[in-house]
Structures are given as structure tokens and as C-alpha cells.
Image (tube, rainbow, N blue to C red):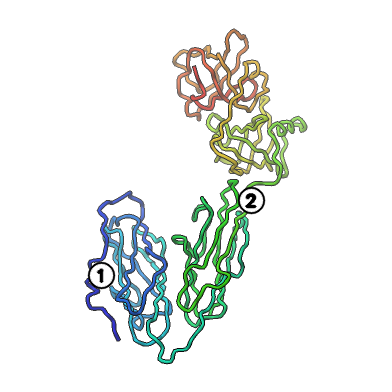
């Protein structure tokens, strides 16, 4: 038996890479295998297995490596440093950004067939956490059988060539791979994944087993003829086009071959665009005229619009939203999650129609995220007169008024509260209301004449959205 240990222990001592730059400090340092699939020939001297850290270690630590598979020690391989009860205790030294150990194959000069070795990281010490924790080594037997018998390789195939799955399918989609017949030993297949542009792993989808560097390892244990690769789409509530992913059988262990059904096309159907027609805000406001007192929508009722204000509103639950026909005040059941400039589709099911001082509002909206249709959408304010503001015609809309001034501005009064707004020689007055939660509420009221932009509120009230809406 040839073990080839000789000078390799010295090699282990000098292998390594130190990192002097402590990098950005995080709570825990992530430890992971550098590669999830490795290959080793029985005739090789050794295989260096590398465990990498996402930053230089801030302290000394330890990590366990557990071994399993059809290969066993010491018949087929030896590990350096030596195993204790079948487990390698790997040291993580302070300042280092990787740790290594050696796998020495046993060249027994007998054809016992290729084997596989599975390694799993576990039980990291305090200050460390696991990343990619599993790696598989295929060990190829280089010996010829004394009585060789020609054996045909087993074909591995996808069970179907294409399929589709909805983006909102929480159970995902099971992709089936099959062997045309069972193998007497464990076999490894790697699936290459080619997603559409801008369709990202961990952001738009996940897989089980985990995808590493666009490869997914699939292990067929001895006697198994099919395996499932699970695909899980992530519903982002953003309207995009359908995504396509091509899965290809790209690598396989000895004894297998690529079958005729070697690729699989999966289409992820975008389902955020609801086919139910959206109502305009003008139609929603007209609904108030048809009902007395407070009322609610017992079923789906969709509107689409752009968020125009989230700051100068009564509480964290409120926003103003506007489309090409008008604007309205919305209150969610919990804090608002939307931002100014986002175009969204909201379902007003179970929301209550409420009118206060002439201002129409929908209260108790449960659909807090809606479906995102666009971002950074600029809404141009409508230029109106002071009389227009007082009439309430533009309630809920983004408007601007020229040649305005605050008669009570004295260099001391701040925006918080309600202040009279006048225009030129017009004897009528409007009110500018600023809530204490607005970011500019403690700024000094301006003197002089200016153009002011804000959301028209109840009766003759104007709600500034920010100080950027003021120009002299």
C-alpha cells in the first residue's frame, strides 16, 4: 500500500494566506468551502482543501469538518491533520483569511471503482458562522481491473425539456433528473444554470441544493435513479417581464454520460400585473357621491397612482397618491412602506371611504406594498389660483400657487401649525398646514413673495411636501 505521506506534512505547514487588513468589522466572520465540488485521482499526491473567511479572522477559532460518502479512511484516503473520531478539528488563526487541510488518496493498485467523499462544516466557535458548508470530492480509481469488462456509461437526463412556474409559487418547482438505470456507487452530476439578464440568485430565486458559481451539485446515492432539484422564485411585487433560466447537465462523474435530454428551460411567469382593471382616482372620488356617510369596499377595488407625499401628513400611516385624473389621501392599517415617486397599484378591499372637511380619504388600506409599477416618477404640479385652492376642486392633487406670501411671517414663526397664505390683492385667504412630524416643521416661515408647491388638502388648506417646493 502506497500512502505518499513523506514531505506533504511540510507542505501543509507552509500553505496559507495571511490577511493583514482587518477589513470592515462585522458581528461574525463567515466561513465556507472555497469550492463545492473537487476532483482527486487515486494516483495524485494530495488534494488541498481550502476553507475561506469573508474577512481576516479577528480571533482564534475552531471548526469541525465531518466526512462521509462511499470513500472511507484509511482504506481510500488519509486526512492531515489527523482525524479524531472521524472528525477534523480545523484551526482558524487570528489574522488569517483561509485555512487548509490535505486529502491524501490511497493508491491500492486494485480497481475498486471510483468513489465520492462528502465534507460538511459544522460547530464553528463563537465569532464565526457558516456559509457554503458542504463540498463533494470525486475520487477516481486509476487501476485497471484484472478481468476488465466493458461497461456502458449510464445516461443522466432531465425528465422534461421545459416548464413554467408562477413567480408567486411558494412551493417552487421540482426539476427532476433521472438515471437510465441505477448505479452501484454514488454518482455526482453538476447542473450549470444560465439565468436571464438581471435575474439574480438570492434576489429573484433560490435553489435546493444551493447554487455556487452558477453550478448546482446533484448527488445520486448508490441505487438511486432520480433526484429533484428544487427551484424557488422570489415574488418581488414588481412588474417585470417573464424570466427564463436554462439548466444544463455540464459535468458528471465517471460511469455517467450526458443523455439526450441534457438541458431544461424554466420560464418564471411574471404575475404582479393584475388583469383586473384599475379604477381612476376620479372614479373613486365619484363613488363618495353615490354613498352616504362612511362606506367600505367588500371586494377587490384597484387604483394606480404615484405617491406624492409621505412627510407632511397627519401620521406615519398616511400618504397622498395621484393619477392623471386627481389625487386622494390614503391611510394604511399600519405604517406606510411606500416612498415619494413610486408608482403603485393598490387594492382598496376592506378600506373605508371617509370625508373630513370636504377632503375625501380612504382609511384602513391593508395593501401596504401594492404592486410596484415604477420608481422616481415625477408628478408635475398643476398651477392654480388661490380661489381654486379654496374651492376644493384640486383636493388631493399636487398644485402650485404663484405670487404668494405669509402675512404673519415675522422672522420668528416656524412652519409647524397653520398659517394664512395670501396672493397679491386677493382679499381671500388660504391656510398652509404643516404637521410637527414634517422634516421642515421647525424652519422659519419665509418673508417676501414666492411660488409655493404642495398638496391641496381639506377646504382651503395646502400641505407643503418639502422646502424644495418653495421658490422666490
Can you see residue 83? no
Determine which quarter of the picture holds residue 160.
bottom right
Q: Position of residue 222 (x, y in %)?
A: 50, 80
Dot 1 falls on a residue whose secondary structure is helix
- Residue 125 in the image: x percent, y percent? 34, 62
Q: At 65% from the left edge and 36% from the top edge, which residue is drawn?
A: 363
Residue at 60 percent across and 52 percent down: it is 242
Q: Which residue is mark 2?
A: 271
Q: Nearer the viewer, residue 19 or 122?
A: 19
Among the two numbered marks 2 and 1 on one chain, the one whose residue lies closer to the N terminus? 1
How would you rate the neighbour count of disc 2 (Cα within 10 Å): few for under 14, some for 14-19, many for 20 or more?
Answer: some
Above or below, 402 relative to 280: above
Say how many tags the image has. Answer: 2
**Residue 446, image x and y in percent?**
47, 16
Which residue bears the numbered disc 1?
12
Q: Is residue 347 left or right of residue 74?
A: right
Amino acid at each position: 500500500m502506497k500512502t505518499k505521506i513523506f514531505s506533504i506534512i511540510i507542505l501543509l505547514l507552509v500553505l496559507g494566506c495571511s490577511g493583514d487588513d482587518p477589513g470592515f468589522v462585522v458581528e461574525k466572520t463567515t466561513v465556507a468551502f472555497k469550492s463545492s465540488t473537487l476532483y482527486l485521482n487515486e494516483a495524485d499526491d494530495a488534494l488541498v482543501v481550502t476553507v475561506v473567511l469573508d474577512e481576516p479572522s479577528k480571533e482564534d477559532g475552531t471548526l469541525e469538518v465531518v466526512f462521509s460518502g462511499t470513500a472511507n479512511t484509511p482504506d481510500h484516503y488519509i486526512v492531515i491533520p489527523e482525524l479524531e473520531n472521524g472528525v477534523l478539528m480545523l484551526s482558524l488563526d487570528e489574522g488569517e483569511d483561509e485555512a487548509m487541510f490535505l486529502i491524501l488518496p490511497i493508491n491500492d493498485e486494485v480497481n475498486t471503482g471510483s468513489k465520492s467523499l462528502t465534507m460538511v462544516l459544522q460547530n464553528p466557535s463563537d465569532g464565526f458562522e457558516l456559509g457554503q458548508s458542504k463540498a463533494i470530492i470525486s475520487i477516481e480509481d486509476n487501476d485497471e481491473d484484472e478481468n476488465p469488462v466493458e461497461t456502458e456509461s449510464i445516461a443522466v437526463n432531465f425528465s422534461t425539456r421545459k416548464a413554467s412556474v408562477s413567480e408567486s409559487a411558494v412551493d417552487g418547482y421540482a426539476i427532476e433528473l433521472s438515471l437510465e438505470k441505477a448505479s452501484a456507487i454514488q454518482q455526482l452530476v453538476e447542473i450549470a444554470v444560465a439565468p436571464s439578464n438581471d435575474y439574480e440568485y438570492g434576489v429573484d430565486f433560490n435553489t435546493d441544493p444551493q447554487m455556487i458559481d452558477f453550478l448546482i451539485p446533484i448527488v445520486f446515492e448508490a441505487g438511486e435513479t432520480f433526484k429533484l432539484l428544487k427551484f424557488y422564485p422570489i415574488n418581488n411585487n414588481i412588474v417585470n417581464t417573464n424570466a427564463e433560466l436554462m439548466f444544463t447537465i455540464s459535468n458528471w462523474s465517471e460511469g455517467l454520460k450526458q443523455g439526450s435530454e441534457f438541458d431544461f428551460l424554466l420560464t418564471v411567469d411574471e404575475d404582479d400585473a393584475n388583469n383586473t382593471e384599475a379604477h381612476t382616482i376620479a372614479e373613486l372620488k365619484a363613488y363618495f357621491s353615490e354613498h352616504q356617510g362612511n362606506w367600505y369596499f367588500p371586494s377587490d377595488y384597484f387604483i394606480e397612482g404615484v405617491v406624492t407625499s409621505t412627510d407632511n401628513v397627519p401620521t406615519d400611516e398616511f400618504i397622498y397618491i395621484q393619477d392623471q385624473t386627481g389625487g386622494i389621501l390614503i391611510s394604511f392599517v399600519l405604517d406606510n412602506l411606500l416612498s415619494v415617486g413610486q408608482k403603485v397599484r393598490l387594492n382598496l378591499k376592506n378600506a373605508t371611504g371617509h370625508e373630513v372637511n370636504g377632503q375625501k380619504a380612504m382609511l384602513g388600506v391593508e395593501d401596504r406594498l401594492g404592486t410596484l409599477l415604477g420608481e422616481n416618477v415625477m408628478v408635475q404640479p398643476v398651477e392654480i389660483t388661490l380661489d381654486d385652492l379654496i374651492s376644493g376642486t384640486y383636493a388631493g392633487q399636487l398644485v402650485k400657487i404663484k405670487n404668494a406670501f405669509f402675512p404673519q411671517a415675522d422672522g420668528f414663526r416656524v412652519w409647524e401649525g397653520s398659517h394664512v397664505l395670501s396672493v397679491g390683492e386677493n382679499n381671500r385667504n388660504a391656510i398652509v398646514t404643516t404637521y410637527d412630524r414634517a422634516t421642515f416643521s421647525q424652519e422659519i416661515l419665509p418673508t417676501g413673495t414666492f411660488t409655493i408647491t404642495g398638496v391641496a388638502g381639506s377646504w382651503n388648506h395646502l400641505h407643503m411636501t418639502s422646502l424644495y417646493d418653495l421658490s422666490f
